[in-house]
Image: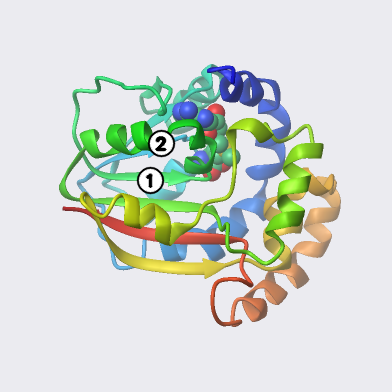
Amino acid sequence: MDENSQKIHYEMIHDDYAKHYYDPTSMEFRDKFMYKYLFKGLDLNNKKVADLASGSGYNSLALMKYFPKVQVFGFDISKKACQDYKKTVGRPAYEIDLTKKTDLKEEYDCAMIIGGLHHCVSDLEATFENISAILKPGGSLLMIEPNKNYFLEPLRKLWYKLDKYFEENTEEALDHDSLLFKQAQHFNVEKIFYLGGPAYFLIYNSLLFRLPIRIKKVVAPILLLLEKIYNLCPGKVMFPYFIAQWKKK
Ligand SMILES: C[S@@+](CC[C@H](N)C(=O)[O-])C[C@H]1O[C@@H](n2cnc3c(N)ncnc32)[C@H](O)[C@@H]1O
């Protein structure tokens, strides 16, 4: 496996990714079906938050809206993402590979990783060592990742293989419970949600469905409404992503 394949991949698709994943309809999706759960019950004002696999920084911007006194810092393997982060957020961003041992000196009250962990499957152990090393005891680890227990997982695997927007050798959906089991020495789970219906695919992941932005604007209101209804389904196999809040011991 090429150690920098995720870097090469994300620098190559940078513009397409930013166009589809940070347009107003995707941001509305994130607001209603991601941040609301991810930040539930937390007060991150006056806290230092590491936004890991931060991309261009829009999650940090959202965090600053929720908690105006938060201090955010971006981290990403992609140079283009770090450059964008600094411009968009006006805060520092560091180019790092989370799967390689890093010697970051700073400690943070919270780390959030949105759609990033499943790109670190080449060495999840090292990734968690890095995350643990920068988190203070009692600090929060917030994550949103694709759910491996989703009933359409075989289809998703096939898609990862066939679509140029995936780097199939270095990414795969995650099983939250086995992830937690492996990290049980270091973390407790505080909250876990399983979510995702039609808007997760057609609005949030519109790039994969090649849905033009102008069409997204038209279909977003109905899909966002359907999403709310779909999320009433029970269990975890019906849902393509999970949102978890962990606490470092
Ligand atoms: C699906 S994007 C998510 C970006 C952003 N968090 C968001 O919500 O849009 C995955 C991000 O992970 C970054 N990434 C992939 N592998 C990484 C690694 N080993 N270390 C740090 N960042 C990585 C990519 O450059 C990309 O920005």
- x, y percent for residue 79: 52, 17
Q: Of label 1 and label 2, which has the lower sequence position?
A: 2
* Three-letter amino acid code of the residue under disc 2: Leu
Q: CA distance from mark 1 to mark 2?
A: 6 Å
* Three-letter amino acid code of the residue under disc 1: Met
Left or right of 31 on screen, residue 153: right
Give the residue at x 81% y 38%: 162
Say if residue 133 shows up in the picture: yes
Position of residue 128 relative to residue 102, above or below, is below
Give the residue at x 58% y 57%: 148
Closer to the camera in the image, 147 or 225: 147
Position of residue 97 relative to residue 226, above or below, is above
Position of residue 190 relative to residue 89, above or below, is below
Please say if the residues under marks 1 and 2 sit with CB atoms less than 8 Å apart: yes
Disc 2 under 8 Å from ligand 1? The reply is: yes
Check the picture and name the quadrant holding the N terminus.
top right
Give the residue at x 23% y 34%: 134
| Tag shown at residue 246 | none
Which quadrant of the view contains residue 152? bottom right
Say if residue 55 shows up in the picture: no
Closer to the camera in the image, 155 or 55: 155
Q: Circle 2 is placed at which residue position?
A: 52
- x, y percent for residue 205: 70, 50
- x, y percent for residue 232: 59, 82
Mark 1 residue element:
strand
Which quadrant of the view contains residue 91? top left
Mark 2 residue element:
strand
| Tag shown at residue 112 | 1
Which quadrant of the view contains residue 70? top left
